[in-house]
Image (cartoon, rainbow, N blue to C red):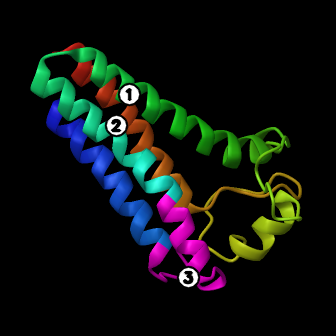
Amino acid sequence: MYALAIVLILAAVGYFLVMTLVDLFPLNNVRDATRSEQLTEVAVNAPVMALPAVLLGVAAATSLPAFGYAGAVLESLAVLGGLLLWWSPYLLGVVMPWATAGTGVSWAQLHARTYARTVTVLPRIGDRPRPNLEHMILHALMLGAAVTTFAASAAM
C-alpha cells in the first residue's frame, strides 16, 4: 500500500505540472495563461502537493505512522479544496469565496475564459460551470492518494 500511495501522490504532482506547464489543448488551456502565472501556480501548489509523499517517506523511515497520517490529512485537505472549488458550483450552484481571489472576475467569467473550451464530459446543469476532464483526472488521482496514504499509514 505504501508504494501505491507514493506512486499516486507523485502521479498527481507530475500530472499537475504537465497540465500547468504544457499546452495540451483541448485537454487543458494553458495557452491563455502567461508563463509568470503558470510558474506562480507551480511554485504555490507543487510543494504542497508533494509534501504528503515526503511525510509518508518519513513515516516509513522512522516507523512513526503519525507522519503518514499528517500527509494523508494534507492530501485530503488539498483534494477537498479542489472539490469545493470545482464541484460545488456545478452541483450546488455555490461558488467558494476564494475561487477567484484577486482576479476581479467571477468564477463563471474565469471558467468561461479559461476552461469552457476544454474537454468536458459532464452534462450541463443550467448555466453552471462544469468541471473539465483535466480536473476530474487530477481530483481522482488526489483522492486515490489520500485514501491509500491513510491505508499505508494504518499498515505501518
Q: Is residue 36 magenta?
A: yes
In 3D space, how far apart are the residues under numbered discs 1 and 2 (Cα atoms)?
A: 6 Å
Mark 1 and mark 2 residues within 8 Å of each other at the beta carbon: yes
Mark nearer the viewer, 3 or 1: 3
* Residue at x 12% of width, y 21% of height: 62
Mark 3 and mark 1 residues within 8 Å of each other at the beta carbon: no
Can you give x and y, in whole percent of width and height, for residue 75 in the image? 43, 35
Residue 15 falls in which quadrant of the image? bottom left
* Residue at x 35% of width, y 47% of height: 50
Looking at the rendered structure, the number of numbered marks drawn on it comes to 3
The first of marks 3 and 1 along the sequence is 3
Side (left or right) of 152 relative to 23: left
- What mark, if any, has residue 72 been given in the picture? 1
Q: Tell me the residue that label 3 is attached to.
A: 35
- What mark, if any, has residue 52 been given in the picture? 2
Q: Tell me the amino acid under the disc marked 2.
A: Pro
Bounds of the magenta segment: 21-43
Q: Tell me the amino acid under the disc marked 3.
A: Arg
Q: Check disc 3 and report its element: helix, strand or loop.
A: helix
The first of marks 2 and 3 along the sequence is 3
**Residue 41 visible:** yes
Mark 2 and mark 3 residues within 8 Å of each other at the beta carbon: no
**Which is more toward the observer, 47 or 132?**
47
Can you give x and y, in whole percent of width and height, for residue 57 in the image? 19, 34
In 3D space, how far apart are the residues under numbered discs 2 and 3 (Cα atoms)?
A: 27 Å
The first of marks 1 and 2 along the sequence is 2
Q: Check disc 2 and report its element: helix, strand or loop.
A: helix
Q: Identify the image quadrant of the C terminus.
A: top left
**Residue 29 visible:** no
- What mark, if any, has residue 148 been given in the picture? none
Q: Tell me the amino acid under the disc marked 1.
A: Ala
Can you give x and y, in whole percent of width and height, for residue 7 in the image? 22, 46
